[in-house]
Image (cartoon, grey):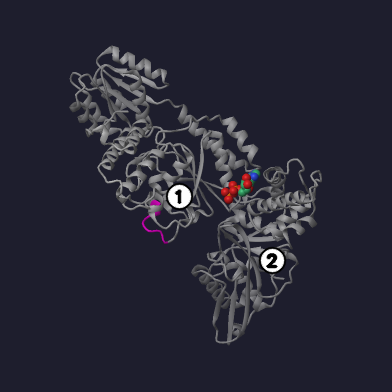
């Protein structure tokens, strides 16, 4: 590295600490531009009193700078068939998702194997030949031309990653080439060669945008290193548009573990940060270094933990960025995710650019509709919708139980889980689309068994986990959800909702009492849901003849609609159909069938409009024991995404008008 430190000092004056810092900077892998700034900081510290707060801030800053993995990257080793083996070994099912991931990785392989292109321009044939020889050995695709005009011609035809040009040439010189490149190809780097290593020539070229300069006679090591660094700094001409993967789905469906498998198959480090509840841009971008507690942002902190500048970096819960975010979260994150901007990512604390272009970002979210649109635009979303009972059982036996046994040290005396026990754990102790709580319960049982074995010192006793043991270890069942067995009452309808945790069963209760024609709505309903309840009421009042009701039936009565569980906020238009069903049932005194559930937006004229999350809702319905689900006709296409196995378990009806299916809903 070039030494930019210029101040003359008396050796004896220097404190050991400062000298150590300076050496550390010189030996570090910092990019040249950063090292220059770091050395200036060391220089400044040298003049600062060690007892001042400023000194402490400065020392902490330097320590931090030196602890970052600047140019440190792990070597990618991507073999698609190995990646496929890893993904299959670590995940059950998810065939389409694995295929999408492999496609994404394959594109990366193609890009990686696409060798970087270098154009060498020099009127000395020897230099051209030497550079060609050295750089081709490094794996680059190298072309050379012996004059400036030819170079301009080549530049018009082909996008090069790097141009190495002599400064002094007849007619068209190095500066003209540099200017043309800067004007035309932003992502191409330029290194100038100068025979007269005057600082003036070099600084002129640097100020016009060349990456660096090489002085003749060329030193081969210097050539190799400078080229390598220049190519790492430049955004590859082939890699500017690849989108960022985003796994979207309920908790526990395997988003994190897919990310980890990707890291393993690329042999990269894996790092994950959560964006949930982030309120301030400084959490992403860091605090300015003006006070003692200032810190770098989460991105830089993550890289520091990863100890490499090219990890697989998971940005968890992109949809949960705090609503009261100060500044524009999308803008801050776009700068992180966009390969065209992120090679010079500025963290406020570091105050020097950090190159994020080698990081492979993967985002996760529960619901994509909460992701800011400009961000969503940059993402390639892959949906994970949740698992059926059978899939959960398979995953429990093949993955979760063996892992829990190993983690709790029970491998020597592995407990045997009966299928009914796992089934009981899923039905009675969890209510989820994913596997988080199931995994927690399995681990909990294994820990309790371990304790039992240690206490009784019966080391050889291998235990069988029966449904009774499950109850003994986990306490009484928490969920009783046999909807079909519940009593049928009028004014009570079953809906299907989509929440961050996947599909869910939702009940709507309606009752009436003497009053003044008021509509009371309770259950922490959001504005949209309140409005759709009002619309459902108006629909019924204006269409009494469809249901054989006298027009005056509403007079002198208040209607109360309640959606349990009352404390959980609910919103969205998809409950319109369910509310209408509850109201019609209330007034016609015909109970709704308890094994029928529905989801749809209702218009004032009784038309049913399409809704989202069909697959998730069907999974939730199957799990709750529903026999028939009703969806809007326009959602017919979404049913294709649901597997045959699930469709065989449930009858799916679609309708465009509420009158078409009222007899399916009501008894
Ligand atoms: P998320 O990040 O979506 O919340 P996780 O990746 O943490 O979910 O998954 C929860 C647990 O379930 C992990 O232990 C994971 O390995 C396991 N898991 C999820 N999906 C699968 C699958 N298809 N095959 C095997 N294990 C799975």
Which residue occupies the extreme front position in the image? 12
Residue 661 located left or right of residue 533: right
Residue 150 placement: quadrant: top left
Residue 438 point in image, percent of width and height: 67, 53
Q: Vertical placement of 598 versus 224: above or below?
A: below
Residue 649 located left or right of residue 320: right
The residue that mark 2 highlights is: 664
Verify whether residue 482 appears in magenta: no
Residue 283 point in image, percent of width and height: 41, 52
Any mark on residue 376, and which? 1
Residue 441 point in image, percent of width and height: 69, 54
- For the record, the magenta segment spans 324-330
Residue 180 located left or right of residue 95: left
The earlier-in-sequence mark between 1 and 2 is 1
Inspect this view and state whether residue 186 appears. Answer: no
Q: Distance of mark 1 from mark 2, alpha carbons? A: 39 Å
Residue 179 placement: quadrant: top left
What is the crowding at mark 2: few (fewer than 14 residues within 10 Å), some, or many (at least 20)?
some
């Amino acid at each position: 590295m070039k030494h930019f430190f210029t101040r003359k000092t008396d050796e004896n004056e220097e404190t050991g600490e400062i000298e150590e810092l300076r050496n550390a900077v010189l030996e570090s892998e910092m990019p040249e531009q950063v090292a220059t700034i770091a050395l200036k900081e060391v220089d400044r510290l040298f003049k600062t009193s060690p007892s001042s707060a400023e000194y402490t801030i400065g020392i902490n800053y330097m320590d931090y700078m030196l602890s970052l993995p600047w140019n440190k990257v792990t070597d990618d080793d991507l073999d698609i068939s190995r990646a496929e083996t890893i993904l299959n070994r670590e995940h059950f099912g998810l065939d389409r998702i694995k295929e999408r991931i492999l496609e994404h990785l394959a594109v990366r392989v193609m890009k990686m194997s696409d060798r970087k292109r270098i154009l060498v321009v020099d009127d000395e044939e020897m230099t051209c030949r030497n550079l060609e020889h050295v750089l081709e050995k490094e794996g680059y695709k190298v072309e050379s031309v012996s004059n400036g005009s030819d170079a301009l011609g080549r530049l018009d035809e082909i996008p090069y990653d790097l141009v190495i040009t002599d400064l002094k040439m007849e007619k068209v010189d190095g500066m003209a080439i540099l200017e043309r490149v800067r004007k035309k190809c932003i992502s191409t780097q330029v290194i100038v060669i100068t025979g007269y290593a005057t600082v003036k020539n070099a600084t002129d070229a640097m100020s016009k945008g060349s990456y660096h300069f090489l002085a003749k006679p060329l030193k081969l090591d210097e050539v190799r290193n400078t080229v390598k660094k220049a190519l790492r700094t430049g955004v590859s001409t082939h890699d500017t548009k690849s989108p960022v993967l985003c796994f979207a789905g309920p908790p526990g469906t395997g988003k994190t573990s897919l990310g980890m498998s990707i890291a393993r198959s690329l042999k990269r480090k894996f790092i994950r940060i959560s964006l949930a509840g982030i309120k301030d841009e400084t959490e992403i971008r860091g605090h300015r270094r003006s006070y003692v507690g200032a810190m770098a942002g989460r991105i830089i902190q993550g890289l520091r933990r990863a100890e490499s500048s090219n990890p697989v970096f998971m940005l968890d819960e992109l949809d949960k960025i705090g609503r009261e975010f100060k500044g524009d979260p999308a803008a801050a994150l776009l700068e992180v995710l966009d390969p065209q901007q992120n090679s010079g990512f500025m963290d406020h604390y570091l105050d020097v650019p950090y190159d994020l272009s080698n990081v492979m970002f993967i985002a996760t979210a529960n619901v994509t509709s909460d992701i800011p649109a400009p961000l969503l635009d940059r993402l390639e979303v892959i949906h994970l919708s949740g698992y059926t009972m059978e899939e959960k059982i398979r995953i429990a036996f093949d993955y979760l139980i063996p892992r829990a046994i190993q983690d709790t040290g029970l491998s020597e005396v592995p407990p045997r889980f009966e299928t009914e026990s796992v089934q009981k754990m899923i039905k009675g102790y969890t209510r989820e689309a994913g596997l988080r709580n199931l995994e927690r319960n399995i681990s909990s049982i294994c820990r309790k068994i371990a304790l039992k074995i240690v206490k009784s010192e019966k080391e050889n006793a291998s235990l069988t986990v029966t449904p009774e043991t499950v109850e003994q270890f986990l306490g009484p069942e928490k969920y009783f959800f046999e909807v079909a067995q519940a009593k049928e009452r009028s004014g009570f309808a079953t809906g299907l909702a989509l929440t961050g945790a996947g599909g869910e069963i939702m009940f709507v209760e309606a009752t009436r009492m003497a009053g003044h024609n008021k509509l009371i709505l309770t259950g922490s309903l959001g504005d949209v849901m309140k409005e759709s309840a009002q619309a459902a009421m108006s629909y019924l009042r204006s269409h009494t003849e469809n249901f054989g009701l006298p027009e005056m039936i509403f007079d002198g009565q208040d209607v109360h609609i309640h959606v349990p569980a009352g404390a959980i906020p609910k919103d969205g238009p998809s409950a319109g159909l369910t509310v209408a069903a509850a109201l019609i049932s209330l007034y016609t005194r015909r109970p709704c069938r308890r094994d029928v559930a529905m989801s749809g937006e209702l218009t004032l004229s009784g038309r049913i409009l399409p809704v989202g999350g069909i697959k998730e809702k069907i999974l939730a319905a199957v799990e709750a024991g529903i026999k028939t689900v009703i969806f809007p006709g326009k959602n017919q296409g979404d049913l294709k995404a649901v597997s045959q196995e699930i469709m065989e378990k449930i009858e799916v009806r679609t309708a465009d008008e509420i009158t078409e299916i009222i007899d399916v809903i009501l008894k």
